[in-house]
């Protein structure tokens, strides 16, 4: 049997990039999460998959809208009509999937939860448990049904696995325990980055977010096509995202004139073109002579003639500094200045003021613990601005 | 660090050229002036120096036109602290490009340490200065508002825009966010976010909202169900009331019907259709009785008609005569019809004939020709017309002759004396016209002047021999473009070929070393070698067996060990041998690749050289220096072609001007000749006005002459017309005479003939009418005779006696009346006989029908009462009885059916309340109220359902969600940039304050010394004022007055900037050691005093380190010799 496995679709959650300020791109991608989900269902139908597996976070709790639920039911009903059942679980964002509050999703759509943890389709036993609240600090693995001997056992779980520093654990579970549980296949959700783990004949697959929403999710953009039967489950990844994020690193320090700079940026942007997807590029540029605004203006102009590539952001890095501190008085003295407690206090207060002026949900844009990094950027910015406009 | 010599080995147009900068005496200032005219290569030398220090440009090198980039080589002799004097070279390779004197790569740190890690840009900013930089730097430091830190920073770093930069960063940050700012980007974005959030909240179908909408839907549905039930109850009650009312009403009616039925006879109900059938039978009996009676009366009348119309025996003979008479005709009409009027008509015609005779006689008398026979005076109308025409012509011509003679006389009398005849000036006019057409040549002169001015503009910048270049022929544009493209491609190809060869060489060397390493390994011994050791061992064994000596044993032992080792190595060396084979294969492959790379490089070199030669040739053809970059060729070609085109236009314009001048001169001479011919003699300048005056005067003379000639011609024409009229009159008289010669009119004049014409016409007309009338009278007389004959024959048939009082017409009319009467009687008699037979048949049928109807009538009334009534009355009574019976039955069914489906309890309840006149209205009101309640509930429910559906169908506002996310990202980016900018400005300002504190002690004196030196005697010193915003530099005049930096003149600010740079240089030299300072014609715009002062500052620089001054002004060289003791002056190499 072959399944299309996806997770973390976050229906309704928008793309977060300033590239979408472009009206054409904004229009094309405003429904990206829905369009991508539609593409996943299309793929399942086209490939005559035996089931569609969704491992949680189908919705996004920041965008609670029952219209998204209606959309989901429409799409899954379409798959059901084509003979493809759907097995899904609730993740930490899926309050809209609460069957006690909103009822059943319909025929051929199997929501697995504590009261109904297993469904048999063909010769495969699908086991899964759903989040009953937005946060679960303990592992769900002990509550999963025992594997059924003589059948293929597939588990659906929404988990942060071992977790990562700085992030709350969500139904934490170690990979080793998971792979040793006796199931043939684990379909996982929650971590938006795709990965796979194997142990013996067991495969655990995290399909990743099918439509990356921002640069941090650039490794996503795909779903998993898994074939189970005799032997080890086989895995293929299929691109489904309408937009991908990518990074292009450029070093302009050796370049002489503007035409060479343009050529280099142009080549990097053209290299980002993908015939099947739109690409939002983040340029990471090493230069001592250009500010990010200068480079953004150049790149924007070049992109006028490059289809389906858009600029996410320009990040400027100063070249490795070889100059003696004794020579570069300004940088040296700025570094000395920023070490002063009084100065830092003044900076912290200024940043507080700015932070408080921001909408509450993005006050993390100026993290309190990044003042040192900000000051380094500030010293570089002064140097770049100074050299960028003053050359004989 | 000091630059002792710059080697331009292969660079730009230089080959093996050197610029030596002599080392000064120990106590002398180290200043070298490098002099060379424009285009001598000073910029090339400066760039070469920078590339020596920092490496060569990777692509599109500006100085690779003579030598390909890979061949470029510069060098220098430098004195480097802690290393002494070194000769270094730099080639264009990407790596290891810094070489020692022997061309061996050396570490970059040799130079980078000496340069303190400065980048090329840093070096240019700090250790070079040109005229433009000096002026612009002066202007820009004004933005520092005298801030000491910023000014010292400018002096140290050479960067003059820190004030502008910090302002821009602050402005950028303020644009994004400023406390209290109303139009900041952040405020605008937040406002928009608030609006988006509001719209999203309104559009988002959250579970809570869905629950609210669903509850509203359910509640309204329940309310609707209640209202619907109430309405149903009201309807049932209304139905029950209606049924009760019906029951009540019909019960009353049935009682009344029963009372009436008691008065009607008994008997069965009449069969269906009885009433109609009885009525029909009664009508039949009545109709048939009437028909039989009518038939009897009709038979009597018909018999009488037959007896009243007997047959006439003479009718046949009379009809025959009349038929013959009717066939006779007169004037295309039956004779009889005309005969009735013929007699009276005949008398009238005879009277008319007599009257015409009298009129003819009157006409003859009027013509005064009573004795002439009438027939000779009767003319046809054509003859009369000819006669009238001829007579009228004679009369008209007589009148024309008189009028023409009078006109000719008047014209003759009015003709004046002839005026003087004009001269013939036609040739002069022609000459004048030609002159006028070519007289103005201003446009042609202007065209020459305009094109000449354009040519001067176009050839500016072109060599003097540009026309020769064009004349020889320029290369085609495509050729130049191809050449430039090919050269760029070849250059790139050459570079890549060199890099590839370098790579392949290294790869080959590695492969060689690898192969050699494997070959040196014993394990790589091959099968041939072990066969050889085995063969040697066996041979020695054979020899040892033969000798069995100790020597041979030792020898064999040695051979055996060698063989054993070889065998062991071979056995263990399978992998090593494989590796050796692979290493040899790789070496061979590397060698092939190296050779190919070498071939490619050779080809690329050859091609590049060929293209460079072509480029040099093209440059010469275009008037460029041979080393000129081909990129400039097409522009030069275009300029040359434009110049050539303009020159061609000038030639054309000049030729046109020459032609027009020649034409003008020829026209003037021709006009002069024509003027002389008519007696006009003027100087050339006055000739046009003289000719124009003569032509104008001659025009009025010619007009008078033409008018007199026209009057004379008119007089002659009138004389001729009079003569012609006389001739025509004679001809007309002759014609008239020929017409009247045969008539009795001879001797009469044309006027008399015209007067006689009416009578002649009348006579001819009357004579014709008289002839017609005579013929008519004869015809009438014949018709009357025929009529009389017929009348006589009719009288013979009827034996009538001839009575003279009875006319023939009356006899004939009587006969016709008798025949007609006989025909009418026959018709009546025949018709009556036919009708009589029909009536007899009808009478018999009516009698039979009456008998049948009476029998059928009796059957319809079988067993019925009321026998005494007529059938129609009897059947009406019985039918009324049956109708009452039907009514009763229907009413009973109606009241019964009214209860069907009606709630029995409500029926009984409502029936008990009857009769009640207001009950129906009360129940109707109840129903209306229930209906209204139900409608309202239904509408409320429908609205709740609609709202629920709309909430699901509504757009999910993904555009707003996307915009919201985008704005948040923009704010994230913006706030970080703003924070960085604000922190940067804060840090920079602090750093500048620190700089001022740190450097003021060491630099301020240098600044003052340099400033006073270059501005003396206008300024005496500088000072520093402490202000709240920091320390501020000011200039002090000799009179003690102070001037802020921003209030200084542009020139003074430039000088202050130079002073700051000098002080900065000294500071750097003091702290870190000197580096060469390059000054490129900075005194270009200075007067001699300022230039000398500036040179003295350069001398100061030279005392701290090394100053190198490039100039193309010879007088600056002289000034430098005056201002700087022991200055070195070197010329640019040729």
Image (cartoon, coloured by chain):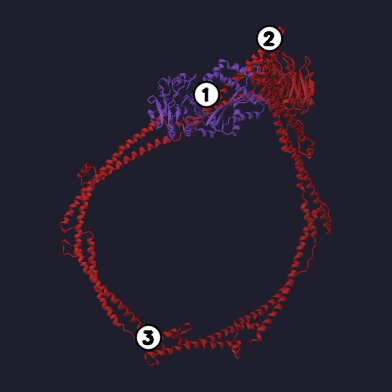
Query: Residues at badges 3 and 1 in contact (C-beta under 8 Å)?
Result: no
Q: Chain of mark 2?
A: B
User: Relative to residue B679, is residue A243 drawn left or right?
Assistant: left
Q: Is residue B662 visible?
A: yes
Residue drawn at (67%, 80%) of the image: B394
Figure colour of chain B = red
| Residue A32 pos. (x, y %) | 50, 32
The chain that hosts pointer 1 is: A
Is B211 situated above or below B258?
Answer: above
Cα distance in 3D space between marks 1 and 2: 86 Å
**Chain ID, purple in image:** A
On the image, the x and y values in percent for residue A270 come to 60, 31
Pointer 3 residue: B316
Residue B1018 visible at all? no
Image coordinates of residue B415 in percent, x first then y, are 75, 70
The reply to whether label 3 and label 1 mark residues of one chain is no
**How would you rate the neighbour count of disc 3 (Cα within 10 Å): few for under 14, some for 14-19, many for 20 or more?**
few
Q: Say which element carries label 2.
A: helix
| Chain under disc 3 | B
Q: Which residue is mark 2?
A: B557
Q: Position of residue B903 (x, y in %)?
A: 23, 42
Judge depth for marks 1 and 2 and give the one in front.
Answer: 2
Q: Quadrant of residue B1005?
A: top right
**On residue B447, which mark appears?**
none
Residue under label 1: A365
């Amino acid at each position: 049997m072959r399944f299309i496995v996806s997770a973390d679709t976050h229906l309704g959650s928008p793309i977060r990039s300033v590239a979408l300020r472009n009206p054409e791109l904004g229009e094309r991608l405003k429904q990206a999460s829905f369009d991508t989900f539609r593409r996943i269902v299309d793929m399942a139908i086209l490939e005559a998959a035996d089931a569609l597996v969704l491992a949680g976070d189908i919705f996004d709790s920041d965008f609670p809208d029952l219209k998204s639920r209606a959309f989901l039911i429409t799409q899954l009903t379409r798959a059901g009509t084509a003979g493809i059942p759907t097995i899904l679980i609730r993740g930490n964002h899926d309050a809209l999937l609460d069957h006690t509050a909103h009822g059943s999703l319909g025929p051929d759509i199997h929501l697995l939860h504590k009261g109904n943890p297993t469904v048999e389709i063909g010769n495969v036993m699908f086991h899964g448990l759903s989040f009953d609240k937005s946060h679960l600090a303990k592992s769900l693995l002990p509550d999963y049904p025992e594997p059924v001997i003589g059948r293929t056992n597939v588990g659906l779980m929404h988990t942060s696995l071992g977790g990562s520093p700085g992030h709350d654990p969500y139904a934490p579970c170690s990979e080793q325990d998971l792979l040793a549980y006796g199931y043939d296949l684990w379909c996982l959700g929650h971590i938006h980055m795709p990965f796979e783990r194997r142990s013996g004949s067991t495969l655990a697959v995290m399909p990743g977010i099918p439509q990356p929403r921002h640069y941090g999710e650039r490794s996503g953009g795909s779903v998993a096509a898994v074939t189970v039967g005799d032997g080890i489950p086989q895995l293929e990844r299929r691109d489904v995202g309408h937009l991908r994020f990518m990074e292009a690193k450029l070093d302009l320090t050796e370049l002489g004139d503007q035409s060479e700079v343009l050529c280099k940026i142009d080549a990097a942007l053209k290299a980002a073109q993908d015939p099947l997807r739109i690409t939002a590029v983040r340029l990471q540029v090493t230069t001592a002579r250009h500010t990010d605004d200068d480079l953004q203006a150049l790149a924007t102009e070049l992109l006028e003639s490059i289809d389906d590539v858009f600029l996410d952001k320009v990040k400027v890095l100063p070249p490795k500094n070889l100059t003696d501190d004794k020579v570069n008085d300004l940088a040296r003295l700025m570094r000395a200045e920023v070490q002063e407690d009084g100065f830092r206090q003044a900076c912290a207060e200024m940043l507080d003021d700015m932070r408080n002026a921001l909408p509450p949900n993005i006050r993390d844009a100026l993290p309190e613990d990044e003042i040192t990094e900000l000051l380094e950027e500030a010293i570089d910015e002064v140097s770049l601005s100074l050299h960028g406009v003053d050359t004989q | 660090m000091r630059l002792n010599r710059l080697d331009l080995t292969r660079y730009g147009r230089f080959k093996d050229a050197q610029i030596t900068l002599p080392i000064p005496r120990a106590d002398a200032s180290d200043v070298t002036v490098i002099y060379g005219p424009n285009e001598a290569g000073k910029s090339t030398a400066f760039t070469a120096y920078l590339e020596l220090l920092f490496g060569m440009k990777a692509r599109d090198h500006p100085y690779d036109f003579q030598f390909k980039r890979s061949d470029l080589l510069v060098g220098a002799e430098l004195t480097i602290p802690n290393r002494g004097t070194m000769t270094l070279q730099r080639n264009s390779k990407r790596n290891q490009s810094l070489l020692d004197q022997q061309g061996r790569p050396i570490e970059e740190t040799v130079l980078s340490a000496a340069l303190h890690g400065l980048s090329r840009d840093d070096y240019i900013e700090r250790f070079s200065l040109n005229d433009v930089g000096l002026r612009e730097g002066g202007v820009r430091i004004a933005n520092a508002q005298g801030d000491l830190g910023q000014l010292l920073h400018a002096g140290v770093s050479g960067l003059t825009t820190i004030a502008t930069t910090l302002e821009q960063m602050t402005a950028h940050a303020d644009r994004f966010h400023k406390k209290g700012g109303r139009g900041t980007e952040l405020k605008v974005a937040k406002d928009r976010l608030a609006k988006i959030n509001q719209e999203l909240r309104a559009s988002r179908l959250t579970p809570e909202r869905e629950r609210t909408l669903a509850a509203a839907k359910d509640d309204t549905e329940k309310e609707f169900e209640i209202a619907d039930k109430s309405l149903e109850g009201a309807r049932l009650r209304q139905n029950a009331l209606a049924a009760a009312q019906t029951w009540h009403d019909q019960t009353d009616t049935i009682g009344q019907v029963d009372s009436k039925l008691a008065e009607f006879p008994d008997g069965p109900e009449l069969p269906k259709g009885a009433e109609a059938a009885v009525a029909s039978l009664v009508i039949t009996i009545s109709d048939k009785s009437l028909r039989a009676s009518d038939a009897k009366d009709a038979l009597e009348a018909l018999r009488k008609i037959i007896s009243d119309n007997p047959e006439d025996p003479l009718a046949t003979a009379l009809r025959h005569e009349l038929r013959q008479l009717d066939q006779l005709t007169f004037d295309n009409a039956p004779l009889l019809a005309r005969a009735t009027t013929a007699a009276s008509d005949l008398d009238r015609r005879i009277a008319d004939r007599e009257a015409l005779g009298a009129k003819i006689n009157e006409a003859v008398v009027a013509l005064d020709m009573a004795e002439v026979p009438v027939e000779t005076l009767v003319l046809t109308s054509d003859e009369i017309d000819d006669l009238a025409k001829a007579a009228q012509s004679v009369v008209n011509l007589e009148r024309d002759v008189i009028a023409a003679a009078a006109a000719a006389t008047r014209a003759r009398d009015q003709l004046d004396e002839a005026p003087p005849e004009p001269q013939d000036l036609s040739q002069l006019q022609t000459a004048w016209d030609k002159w006028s057409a070519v007289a103005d040549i201003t446009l042609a002169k202007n065209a020459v002047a305009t094109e000449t001015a354009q040519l001067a503009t176009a050839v500016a910048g072109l060599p003097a021999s540009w026309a020769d270049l064009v004349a020889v022929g320029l290369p085609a544009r495509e050729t130049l473009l191809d050449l430039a493209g090919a050269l760029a491609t070849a250059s790139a190809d050459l570079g890549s070929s060199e890099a590839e060869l370098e790579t392949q060489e290294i790869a080959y060397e590695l492969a060689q070393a690898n192969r050699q390493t494997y070959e040196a390994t014993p394990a790589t011994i091959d099968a041939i070698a072990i066969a050889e050791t085995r063969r040697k061992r066996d041979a020695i064994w054979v020899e040892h067996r033969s000798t069995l000596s100790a020597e041979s044993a030792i020898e064999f032992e040695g051979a055996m060990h060698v063989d054993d080792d070889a065998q062991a190595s071979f056995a263990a060396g399978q992998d090593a041998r494989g590796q050796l084979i692979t290493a040899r294969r790789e070496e061979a492959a590397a060698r092939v690749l190296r050779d190919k790379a070498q071939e490619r490089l050779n080809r690329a070199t050859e091609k590049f050289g060929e293209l460079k030669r072509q480029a040099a040739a093209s440059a010469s053809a275009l008037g460029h220096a041979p080393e000129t970059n081909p990129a400039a060729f097409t522009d030069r070609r275009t300029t040359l072609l434009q110049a050539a085109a303009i020159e061609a236009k000038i030639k054309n314009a000049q030729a046109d001007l020459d032609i027009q001048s020649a034409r003008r001169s020829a026209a003037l001479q021709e006009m002069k000749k024509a003027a002389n011919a008519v007696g006009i003699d003027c100087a050339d300048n006055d000739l046009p006005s003289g000719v124009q005056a003569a032509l104008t005067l001659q025009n009025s003379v010619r007009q008078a002459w033409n008018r007199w000639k026209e009057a004379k011609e008119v007089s002659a024409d009138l004389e001729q017309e009079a003569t012609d009229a006389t001739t025509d009159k004679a001809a007309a008289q002759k014609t008239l005479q020929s017409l009247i010669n045969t008539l009795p009119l001879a001797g009469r004049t044309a006027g008399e003939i015209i007067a006689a014409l009416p009578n002649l016409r009348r006579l001819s007309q009357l004579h014709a009418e008289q002839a017609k009338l005579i013929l008519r009278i004869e015809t009438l007389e014949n018709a009357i005779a025929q009529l009389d004959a017929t009348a006589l024959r009719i009288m013979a048939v009827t034996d009538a006696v001839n009575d003279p009082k009875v006319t023939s017409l009356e006899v004939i009319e009587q006969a016709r009346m008798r025949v007609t009467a006989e025909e009418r009687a026959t018709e009546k008699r025949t018709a009556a006989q036919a009708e009589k037979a029909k009536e007899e048949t009808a009478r018999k049928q009516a009698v039979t029908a009456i008998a049948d109807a009476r029998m059928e009538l009796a059957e319809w009334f079988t067993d019925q009462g009321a026998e005494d009534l007529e059938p129609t009355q009897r059947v009406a009574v019985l039918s009324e009885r049956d109708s009452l019976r039907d009514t009763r039955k229907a009413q009973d069914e109606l009241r019964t059916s009214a209860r069907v489906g009606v709630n029995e309890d409500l029926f009984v309840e409502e029936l008990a309340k009857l009769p009640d006149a207001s009950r129906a209205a009360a129940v109707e009101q109840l129903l209306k109220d229930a209906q209204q309640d139900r409608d309202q509930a239904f509408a409320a429910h429908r609205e709740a359902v609609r709202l629920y559906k709309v909430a699901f169908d509504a757009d999910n506002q993904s555009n707003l969600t996307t915009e919201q996310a985008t704005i948040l990202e923009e704010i994230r980016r913006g706030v970080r940039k703003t924070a960085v900018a604000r922190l940067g400005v804060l840090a920079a300002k602090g750093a500048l304050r620190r700089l001022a504190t740190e450097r003021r002690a060491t630099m301020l004196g240098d600044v003052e010394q340099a400033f006073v030196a270059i501005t003396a005697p206008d300024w005496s010193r500088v000072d520093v004022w402490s202000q709240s915003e920091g320390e501020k530099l000011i200039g002090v005049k000799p009179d003690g007055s102070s001037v802020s930096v921003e209030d200084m003149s542009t020139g003074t600010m430039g000088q202050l900037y130079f002073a700051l740079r000098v002080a900065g240089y000294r500071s750097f030299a003091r702290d870190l050691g000197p580096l060469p300072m390059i000054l490129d014609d900075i005194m270009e715009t200075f007067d001699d005093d300022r230039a000398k002062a500036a040179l003295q500052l350069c001398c100061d620089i030279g005392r701290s380190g090394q100053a190198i001054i490039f100039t193309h002004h010879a007088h600056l060289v002289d000034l430098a010799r005056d201002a700087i003791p022991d200055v070195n002056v070197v010329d640019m190499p040729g």
